[in-house]
Protein backbone atom coordinates (compact mmCIF):
# COMPACT_ATOMS: atom_id res chain seq x y z
CA UNK A 1 0.00 0.00 0.00
CA UNK A 2 2.76 2.41 0.94
CA UNK A 3 4.64 1.62 -2.26
CA UNK A 4 1.51 2.22 -4.33
CA UNK A 5 0.89 5.60 -2.66
CA UNK A 6 4.53 6.54 -3.16
CA UNK A 7 4.38 5.70 -6.90
CA UNK A 8 1.16 7.65 -7.21
CA UNK A 9 2.67 10.72 -5.52
CA UNK A 10 5.81 10.56 -7.69
CA UNK A 11 3.69 10.17 -10.82
CA UNK A 12 1.54 13.17 -9.93
CA UNK A 13 4.64 15.23 -9.16
CA UNK A 14 6.21 14.30 -12.52
CA UNK A 15 3.00 15.17 -14.38
CA UNK A 16 2.85 18.52 -12.57
CA UNK A 17 6.52 19.24 -13.35
CA UNK A 18 6.02 18.36 -17.02
CA UNK A 19 2.98 20.63 -17.24
CA UNK A 20 4.80 23.43 -15.40
CA UNK A 21 7.79 23.10 -17.72
CA UNK A 22 5.48 23.13 -20.77
CA UNK A 23 3.65 26.24 -19.57
CA UNK A 24 6.97 27.97 -18.81
CA UNK A 25 8.41 27.19 -22.23
CA UNK A 26 5.19 28.01 -24.07
CA UNK A 27 3.56 31.02 -22.39
CA UNK A 28 0.15 32.04 -23.69
CA UNK A 29 -1.62 35.38 -23.57
CA UNK A 30 -5.35 35.74 -24.08
CA UNK A 31 -5.20 39.21 -25.66
CA UNK A 32 -2.92 38.27 -28.54
CA UNK A 33 0.12 36.36 -29.79
CA UNK A 34 3.43 36.82 -28.02
CA UNK A 35 6.60 37.48 -30.03
CA UNK A 36 8.51 34.35 -31.11
CA UNK A 37 11.35 33.07 -28.94
CA UNK A 38 12.23 30.56 -26.24
CA UNK A 39 11.97 30.81 -22.46
CA UNK A 40 14.77 28.38 -21.58
CA UNK A 41 14.78 26.43 -18.34
CA UNK A 42 12.21 27.09 -15.61
CA UNK A 43 13.17 29.98 -13.29
CA UNK A 44 16.70 30.60 -14.66
CA UNK A 45 15.46 30.92 -18.24
CA UNK A 46 18.31 31.65 -20.66
CA UNK A 47 20.38 33.74 -18.24
CA UNK A 48 23.44 31.45 -18.37
CA UNK A 49 23.67 31.68 -22.17
CA UNK A 50 23.12 35.44 -22.06
CA UNK A 51 25.97 35.93 -19.58
CA UNK A 52 28.41 33.49 -21.23
CA UNK A 53 31.71 35.24 -22.17
CA UNK A 54 32.83 35.50 -25.80
CA UNK A 55 36.16 36.81 -27.17
CA UNK A 56 34.74 39.18 -29.76
CA UNK A 57 33.67 42.82 -29.96
CA UNK A 58 30.80 41.75 -32.19
CA UNK A 59 27.27 41.25 -30.91
CA UNK A 60 26.96 38.56 -28.27
CA UNK A 61 26.15 35.15 -29.86
CA UNK A 62 23.08 34.85 -27.62
CA UNK A 63 21.55 37.84 -29.40
CA UNK A 64 22.92 37.13 -32.86
CA UNK A 65 21.63 33.53 -33.00
CA UNK A 66 18.16 34.54 -31.84
CA UNK A 67 17.97 37.42 -34.30
CA UNK A 68 18.64 34.95 -37.10
CA UNK A 69 16.13 32.49 -35.68
CA UNK A 70 13.28 34.76 -34.57
CA UNK A 71 13.85 38.22 -36.03
CA UNK A 72 14.61 41.61 -34.47
CA UNK A 73 12.11 41.25 -31.61
CA UNK A 74 11.91 38.04 -29.57
CA UNK A 75 10.87 36.79 -26.15
CA UNK A 76 13.08 35.10 -23.57
CA UNK A 77 13.52 34.81 -19.81
CA UNK A 78 16.45 36.49 -18.05
CA UNK A 79 17.14 36.87 -14.32
CA UNK A 80 13.77 35.27 -13.57
CA UNK A 81 11.90 37.86 -15.68
CA UNK A 82 9.69 37.54 -18.75
CA UNK A 83 11.56 39.65 -21.28
CA UNK A 84 11.09 40.82 -24.85
CA UNK A 85 14.45 41.71 -26.44
CA UNK A 86 14.40 44.46 -29.05
CA UNK A 87 17.22 44.82 -31.56
CA UNK A 88 15.05 47.03 -33.81
CA UNK A 89 16.41 50.62 -33.95
CA UNK A 90 12.95 52.06 -34.70
CA UNK A 91 11.31 50.27 -31.78
CA UNK A 92 14.21 51.10 -29.44
CA UNK A 93 13.97 54.79 -30.29
CA UNK A 94 10.19 54.72 -29.80
CA UNK A 95 10.47 52.97 -26.43
CA UNK A 96 13.05 55.46 -25.15
CA UNK A 97 10.88 58.40 -26.19
CA UNK A 98 7.74 56.95 -24.60
CA UNK A 99 9.19 56.94 -21.09
CA UNK A 100 6.42 57.51 -18.56
CA UNK A 101 3.68 56.83 -21.09
CA UNK A 102 3.67 53.25 -22.34
CA UNK A 103 6.97 52.28 -20.70
CA UNK A 104 8.71 52.88 -17.39
CA UNK A 105 12.37 52.52 -16.48
CA UNK A 106 13.15 49.25 -14.76
CA UNK A 107 16.16 47.78 -12.95
CA UNK A 108 16.50 44.02 -12.36
CA UNK A 109 16.17 42.80 -8.76
CA UNK A 110 19.82 41.67 -8.74
CA UNK A 111 20.93 45.26 -9.45
CA UNK A 112 18.67 46.69 -6.76
CA UNK A 113 19.85 44.16 -4.16
CA UNK A 114 23.50 44.66 -5.07
CA UNK A 115 23.35 48.42 -4.53
CA UNK A 116 20.51 48.57 -2.00
CA UNK A 117 18.40 50.95 -4.08
CA UNK A 118 15.03 49.68 -2.92
CA UNK A 119 13.00 52.62 -4.23
CA UNK A 120 14.62 53.13 -7.63
CA UNK A 121 11.86 51.35 -9.61
CA UNK A 122 9.18 53.35 -7.76
CA UNK A 123 10.31 56.80 -8.87
CA UNK A 124 7.49 58.62 -10.61
CA UNK A 125 8.11 60.79 -13.68
CA UNK A 126 7.91 64.06 -11.74
CA UNK A 127 10.52 62.93 -9.22
CA UNK A 128 12.76 61.58 -12.01
CA UNK A 129 12.68 64.96 -13.75
CA UNK A 130 13.30 66.67 -10.41
CA UNK A 131 16.40 64.57 -9.65
CA UNK A 132 17.64 65.05 -13.22
CA UNK A 133 17.40 68.83 -12.80
CA UNK A 134 19.57 68.61 -9.66
CA UNK A 135 22.23 66.56 -11.46
CA UNK A 136 22.20 69.00 -14.40
CA UNK A 137 23.06 71.85 -12.03
CA UNK A 138 26.32 70.04 -11.27
CA UNK A 139 27.15 68.16 -14.46
CA UNK A 140 25.41 70.33 -17.06
CA UNK A 141 27.31 72.39 -19.68
CA UNK A 142 27.11 75.69 -17.78
CA UNK A 143 28.75 74.35 -14.64
CA UNK A 144 31.26 72.39 -16.73
CA UNK A 145 32.29 75.56 -18.52
CA UNK A 146 32.38 77.82 -15.48
CA UNK A 147 33.67 75.56 -12.68
CA UNK A 148 34.47 71.93 -13.41
CA UNK A 149 36.71 72.37 -16.48
CA UNK A 150 39.55 73.92 -14.44
CA UNK A 151 39.60 71.18 -11.77
CA UNK A 152 39.23 68.42 -14.33
CA UNK A 153 42.12 69.78 -16.44
CA UNK A 154 44.35 70.17 -13.39
CA UNK A 155 43.75 66.64 -12.03
CA UNK A 156 44.13 64.86 -15.40
CA UNK A 157 47.28 66.82 -16.30
CA UNK A 158 48.81 66.13 -12.89
CA UNK A 159 48.09 62.38 -13.04
CA UNK A 160 49.48 61.95 -16.57
CA UNK A 161 52.61 63.92 -15.74
CA UNK A 162 53.12 61.65 -12.72
CA UNK A 163 52.77 58.50 -14.84
CA UNK A 164 55.15 59.73 -17.53
CA UNK A 165 57.76 61.18 -15.14
CA UNK A 166 58.00 57.83 -13.35
CA UNK A 167 57.79 55.90 -16.64
CA UNK A 168 55.05 53.93 -14.91
CA UNK A 169 53.67 50.64 -16.16
CA UNK A 170 49.93 50.94 -15.68
CA UNK A 171 46.80 48.96 -16.42
CA UNK A 172 45.27 51.54 -18.74
CA UNK A 173 41.63 50.63 -18.09
CA UNK A 174 41.92 50.54 -14.29
CA UNK A 175 44.11 53.65 -14.15
CA UNK A 176 41.76 55.68 -16.34
CA UNK A 177 38.73 54.44 -14.40
CA UNK A 178 40.36 55.51 -11.13
CA UNK A 179 41.35 58.89 -12.56
CA UNK A 180 37.89 59.60 -13.95
CA UNK A 181 36.25 58.41 -10.74
CA UNK A 182 38.39 60.80 -8.68
CA UNK A 183 37.44 63.68 -10.98
CA UNK A 184 33.69 63.13 -10.73
CA UNK A 185 33.84 62.33 -7.00
CA UNK A 186 35.45 65.73 -6.45
CA UNK A 187 32.60 67.40 -8.37
CA UNK A 188 29.94 65.47 -6.47
CA UNK A 189 31.23 65.44 -2.89
CA UNK A 190 34.54 67.39 -2.95
CA UNK A 191 36.35 64.07 -2.53
CA UNK A 192 40.15 64.28 -2.71
CA UNK A 193 42.01 60.94 -2.40
CA UNK A 194 45.21 62.74 -1.42
CA UNK A 195 43.65 64.26 1.71
CA UNK A 196 41.57 61.38 3.07
CA UNK A 197 42.39 57.96 4.50
CA UNK A 198 39.34 56.37 2.83
CA UNK A 199 39.86 54.88 -0.62
CA UNK A 200 36.32 55.53 -1.83
CA UNK A 201 36.67 53.63 -5.10
CA UNK A 202 38.00 50.56 -3.31
CA UNK A 203 34.97 50.51 -0.98
CA UNK A 204 32.31 51.18 -3.65
CA UNK A 205 31.31 47.54 -3.86
CA UNK A 206 30.73 47.60 -0.11
CA UNK A 207 27.70 49.88 -0.06
CA UNK A 208 27.51 50.16 3.73
CA UNK A 209 30.96 51.77 4.10
CA UNK A 210 30.33 54.29 1.33
CA UNK A 211 26.81 55.15 2.53
CA UNK A 212 28.10 55.78 6.07
CA UNK A 213 30.71 58.15 4.64
CA UNK A 214 28.07 59.94 2.53
CA UNK A 215 25.75 60.22 5.54
CA UNK A 216 28.54 61.81 7.55
CA UNK A 217 29.37 64.28 4.78
CA UNK A 218 25.70 65.16 4.28
CA UNK A 219 25.17 65.69 8.04
CA UNK A 220 28.22 67.96 8.22
CA UNK A 221 26.98 70.07 5.33
CA UNK A 222 23.44 70.26 6.75
CA UNK A 223 24.77 71.49 10.11
CA UNK A 224 26.95 74.16 8.49
CA UNK A 225 25.84 74.78 4.89
CA UNK A 226 28.11 76.78 2.60
CA UNK A 227 26.75 80.06 1.28
CA UNK A 228 27.91 79.24 -2.24
CA UNK A 229 27.14 75.72 -3.49
CA UNK A 230 30.30 74.04 -4.79
CA UNK A 231 29.40 70.39 -5.23
CA UNK A 232 26.39 68.12 -5.59
CA UNK A 233 26.07 67.56 -1.84
CA UNK A 234 25.77 71.32 -1.31
CA UNK A 235 22.94 71.45 -3.84
CA UNK A 236 21.20 68.52 -2.16
CA UNK A 237 21.45 70.27 1.21
CA UNK A 238 19.81 73.34 -0.34
CA UNK A 239 17.01 71.18 -1.77
CA UNK A 240 16.45 69.33 1.51
CA UNK A 241 16.02 72.66 3.27
CA UNK A 242 13.25 73.83 0.94
CA UNK A 243 9.62 73.69 2.02
CA UNK A 244 7.65 70.83 0.40
CA UNK A 245 10.84 69.44 -1.16
CA UNK A 246 10.41 66.19 -3.11
CA UNK A 247 13.85 65.13 -1.90
CA UNK A 248 14.41 62.96 1.18
CA UNK A 249 17.74 62.26 2.87
CA UNK A 250 17.53 58.64 1.71
CA UNK A 251 16.92 59.56 -1.94
CA UNK A 252 19.67 62.18 -1.78
CA UNK A 253 22.19 59.61 -0.56
CA UNK A 254 21.00 57.07 -3.13
CA UNK A 255 21.40 59.65 -5.89
CA UNK A 256 25.02 60.36 -4.96
CA UNK A 257 25.76 56.65 -4.62
CA UNK A 258 24.33 55.85 -8.08
CA UNK A 259 26.36 58.66 -9.68
CA UNK A 260 29.53 57.35 -8.04
CA UNK A 261 28.74 53.81 -9.21
CA UNK A 262 28.16 55.12 -12.75
CA UNK A 263 31.58 56.75 -12.79
CA UNK A 264 33.15 53.59 -11.33
CA UNK A 265 31.95 51.37 -14.20
CA UNK A 266 32.54 53.89 -16.99
CA UNK A 267 35.61 53.51 -19.19
CA UNK A 268 37.28 55.13 -22.18
CA UNK A 269 39.47 53.57 -24.83
CA UNK A 270 41.34 55.37 -27.71
CA UNK A 271 44.33 57.55 -28.96
CA UNK A 272 45.76 59.81 -31.89
CA UNK A 273 47.45 63.43 -32.36
CA UNK A 274 47.40 66.11 -35.02
CA UNK A 275 44.35 67.99 -33.76
CA UNK A 276 45.85 68.34 -30.28
CA UNK A 277 49.20 69.55 -31.54
CA UNK A 278 47.29 72.22 -33.47
CA UNK A 279 45.62 73.33 -30.24
CA UNK A 280 49.07 73.88 -28.69
CA UNK A 281 50.33 75.80 -31.73
CA UNK A 282 47.37 78.17 -31.63
CA UNK A 283 47.95 79.14 -28.00
CA UNK A 284 49.87 82.14 -26.77
CA UNK A 285 50.98 80.02 -23.80
CA UNK A 286 51.49 76.34 -24.84
CA UNK A 287 51.28 75.11 -21.22
CA UNK A 288 48.04 76.90 -20.35
CA UNK A 289 44.94 74.92 -19.44
CA UNK A 290 42.34 73.78 -21.96
CA UNK A 291 39.57 76.31 -22.52
CA UNK A 292 35.94 75.56 -23.31
CA UNK A 293 36.44 77.00 -26.79
CA UNK A 294 39.39 74.65 -27.42
CA UNK A 295 37.36 71.70 -26.24
CA UNK A 296 34.50 72.59 -28.59
CA UNK A 297 36.98 72.99 -31.48
CA UNK A 298 38.21 69.38 -31.14
CA UNK A 299 35.88 68.00 -33.81
CA UNK A 300 37.96 64.92 -34.65
CA UNK A 301 38.39 64.14 -30.95
CA UNK A 302 34.61 64.21 -30.57
CA UNK A 303 34.37 61.74 -33.47
CA UNK A 304 36.97 59.46 -31.86
CA UNK A 305 35.09 59.48 -28.53
CA UNK A 306 31.78 58.80 -30.26
CA UNK A 307 33.24 55.93 -32.31
CA UNK A 308 34.90 54.42 -29.23
CA UNK A 309 31.56 54.52 -27.43
CA UNK A 310 29.86 52.80 -30.37
CA UNK A 311 32.34 49.92 -30.44
CA UNK A 312 32.67 49.57 -26.67
CA UNK A 313 28.89 49.51 -26.08
CA UNK A 314 29.49 50.59 -22.48
CA UNK A 315 25.81 50.06 -21.62
CA UNK A 316 24.92 46.69 -23.23
CA UNK A 317 21.23 46.81 -22.31
CA UNK A 318 18.46 49.13 -21.13
CA UNK A 319 15.36 47.78 -19.40
CA UNK A 320 11.81 49.15 -19.51
CA UNK A 321 8.60 47.77 -18.03
CA UNK A 322 5.37 48.00 -20.04
CA UNK A 323 2.59 49.89 -18.24
CA UNK A 324 -0.07 48.41 -20.55
CA UNK A 325 -0.38 45.94 -23.42
CA UNK A 326 1.68 47.06 -26.40
CA UNK A 327 1.23 45.85 -30.01
CA UNK A 328 4.24 45.52 -32.31
CA UNK A 329 4.39 43.88 -35.76
CA UNK A 330 1.29 41.79 -35.11
CA UNK A 331 2.44 40.65 -31.67
CA UNK A 332 1.47 41.71 -28.15
CA UNK A 333 3.89 42.59 -25.36
CA UNK A 334 1.77 42.17 -22.22
CA UNK A 335 1.50 44.69 -19.41
CA UNK A 336 4.30 44.33 -16.81
CA UNK A 337 6.59 42.41 -19.16
CA UNK A 338 10.13 43.78 -19.53
CA UNK A 339 11.51 45.16 -22.79
CA UNK A 340 15.27 44.91 -23.05
CA UNK A 341 16.73 47.40 -25.51
CA UNK A 342 20.00 46.01 -26.88
CA UNK A 343 22.13 48.93 -28.25
CA UNK A 344 24.94 46.75 -29.75
CA UNK A 345 22.44 45.46 -32.32
CA UNK A 346 22.19 49.04 -33.58
CA UNK A 347 25.84 50.02 -33.13
CA UNK A 348 27.18 46.88 -34.85
CA UNK A 349 24.55 46.62 -37.59
CA UNK A 350 26.24 46.62 -41.07
CA UNK A 351 23.06 48.04 -42.62
CA UNK A 352 23.39 51.11 -40.38
CA UNK A 353 27.18 51.43 -39.96
CA UNK A 354 29.46 50.35 -42.79
CA UNK A 355 32.13 47.86 -41.63
CA UNK A 356 30.76 48.05 -38.07
CA UNK A 357 33.70 46.22 -36.43
CA UNK A 358 36.20 48.72 -37.88
CA UNK A 359 37.24 51.71 -35.76
CA UNK A 360 36.44 54.62 -38.07
CA UNK A 361 35.85 57.99 -36.35
CA UNK A 362 35.27 59.71 -39.71
CA UNK A 363 31.91 57.98 -40.03
CA UNK A 364 30.58 60.68 -37.68
CA UNK A 365 31.98 63.64 -39.61
CA UNK A 366 29.32 66.24 -40.30
CA UNK A 367 26.75 64.44 -38.15
CA UNK A 368 25.76 66.69 -35.24
CA UNK A 369 24.82 64.92 -32.02
CA UNK A 370 21.43 65.44 -30.41
CA UNK A 371 21.24 66.25 -26.71
CA UNK A 372 18.37 63.78 -26.25
CA UNK A 373 19.80 60.75 -28.05
CA UNK A 374 19.90 59.45 -31.60
CA UNK A 375 18.13 56.58 -33.31
CA UNK A 376 21.39 54.94 -34.43
CA UNK A 377 23.55 55.86 -31.43
CA UNK A 378 22.39 54.85 -27.96
CA UNK A 379 25.58 55.05 -25.87
CA UNK A 380 24.03 57.75 -23.66
CA UNK A 381 20.47 56.44 -23.86
CA UNK A 382 17.68 58.60 -25.19
CA UNK A 383 14.45 60.43 -24.50
CA UNK A 384 13.67 61.52 -20.94
CA UNK A 385 16.41 59.21 -19.59
CA UNK A 386 19.19 60.60 -21.80
CA UNK A 387 22.33 60.58 -19.67
CA UNK A 388 22.70 63.95 -17.93
CA UNK A 389 26.42 63.29 -17.50
CA UNK A 390 27.05 62.83 -21.25
CA UNK A 391 28.82 66.17 -21.74
CA UNK A 392 30.82 65.66 -18.53
CA UNK A 393 32.05 62.27 -19.81
CA UNK A 394 32.97 63.62 -23.24
CA UNK A 395 34.83 66.57 -21.73
CA UNK A 396 36.72 64.25 -19.37
CA UNK A 397 37.79 61.96 -22.22
CA UNK A 398 38.77 64.88 -24.48
CA UNK A 399 41.04 66.39 -21.80
CA UNK A 400 42.62 63.02 -21.09
CA UNK A 401 43.31 62.42 -24.80
CA UNK A 402 44.75 65.91 -25.21
CA UNK A 403 47.39 65.41 -22.53
CA UNK A 404 47.95 61.76 -23.38
CA UNK A 405 48.97 62.51 -26.99
CA UNK A 406 50.76 65.84 -26.40
CA UNK A 407 52.67 65.01 -23.21
CA UNK A 408 53.22 61.25 -23.33
CA UNK A 409 54.54 58.35 -25.33
CA UNK A 410 53.70 54.76 -24.53
CA UNK A 411 54.39 51.19 -25.46
CA UNK A 412 52.41 47.99 -24.98
CA UNK A 413 53.50 45.73 -22.14
CA UNK A 414 50.89 42.98 -21.89
CA UNK A 415 47.18 42.22 -21.96
CA UNK A 416 44.58 43.78 -24.22
CA UNK A 417 42.50 40.65 -24.76
CA UNK A 418 38.77 41.36 -25.03
CA UNK A 419 35.81 39.45 -23.62
CA UNK A 420 32.14 40.37 -24.00
CA UNK A 421 29.84 38.89 -21.33
CA UNK A 422 27.63 40.73 -22.38
CA UNK A 423 29.48 44.01 -21.65
CA UNK A 424 33.06 44.60 -22.86
CA UNK A 425 35.82 43.54 -20.46
CA UNK A 426 39.60 43.15 -20.41
CA UNK A 427 40.18 40.02 -18.26
CA UNK A 428 43.97 40.43 -18.37
CA UNK A 429 43.88 44.21 -18.26
CA UNK A 430 45.75 46.32 -20.79
CA UNK A 431 49.17 47.26 -19.45
CA UNK A 432 51.28 49.99 -21.04
CA UNK A 433 54.39 51.91 -20.05
CA UNK A 434 53.88 55.66 -20.08
CA UNK A 435 56.89 57.91 -20.77
CA UNK A 436 57.52 61.61 -21.40
CA UNK A 437 56.95 62.71 -25.00
CA UNK A 438 60.67 62.93 -25.78
CA UNK A 439 61.52 59.41 -24.53
CA UNK A 440 61.05 56.07 -26.24
CA UNK A 441 59.36 55.13 -29.44
CA UNK A 442 55.61 55.19 -30.02
Image: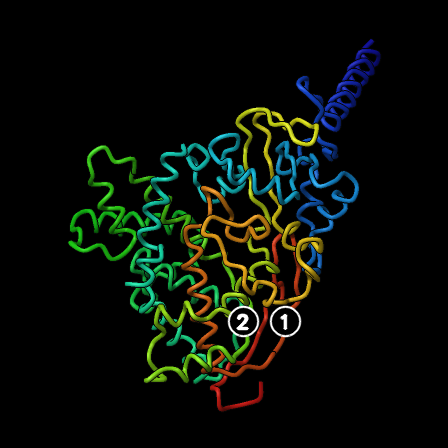
Q: Nearer the viewer, residue 92 or 159?
A: 92
**Mark 1 or mark 2, which is nearer the start of the sequence?**
2
Against 427, residue 413 (above or below) is below
SS label for mark 2: strand
Q: Is 115 on the left or on the right of 329, as rendered?
A: left
| Mark 2, other Cα within 10 Å: few <14 / some 14–19 / many ≥20 | some
Is label 1 in a helix, a strand or a loop?
strand
Residue appearing at x 29%, y 60% in the figure: 190
In the picture of the structure, the residue carrying the numbered disc 1 is 415
Q: Position of residue 50 (x, y in %)?
A: 68, 45
Q: Which residue is mark 2?
A: 171
Name above or below for residue 278 compared with residue 59.
Answer: below
* Left or right position of 371 against 365: left
> Quarter of the image containing the N terminus?
top right
Marks 2 and 1 sit apart, C-alpha to C-alpha, by: 9 Å
Q: Looking at the image, is 140 positioned above or below residue 442?
A: above
Task: Give the residue at x 65% y 53%.
Answer: 421
Q: Residue at x 51, y 90 (%)?
A: 439
Quadrant showing the C terminus: bottom right
Task: Give me the residue at 39% from left, 38% from top.
Answer: 128
In this view, the residue in front, 382 or 243, is 382
Amino acid sequence: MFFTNFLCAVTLLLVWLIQWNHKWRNPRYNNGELPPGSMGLPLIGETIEFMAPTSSIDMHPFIKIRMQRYGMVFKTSLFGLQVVVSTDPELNYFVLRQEGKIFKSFYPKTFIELFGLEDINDLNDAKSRYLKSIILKVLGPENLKEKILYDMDEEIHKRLCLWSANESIIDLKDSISTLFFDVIAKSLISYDPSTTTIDLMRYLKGRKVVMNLLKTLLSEKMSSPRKESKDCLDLLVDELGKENSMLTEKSALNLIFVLLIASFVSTSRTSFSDEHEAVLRNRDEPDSQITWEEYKSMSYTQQVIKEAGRLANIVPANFRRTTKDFAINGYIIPKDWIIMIYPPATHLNPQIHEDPLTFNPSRWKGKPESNCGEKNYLVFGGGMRYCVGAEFSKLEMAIFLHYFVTKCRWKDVKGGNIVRSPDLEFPDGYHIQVMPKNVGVL
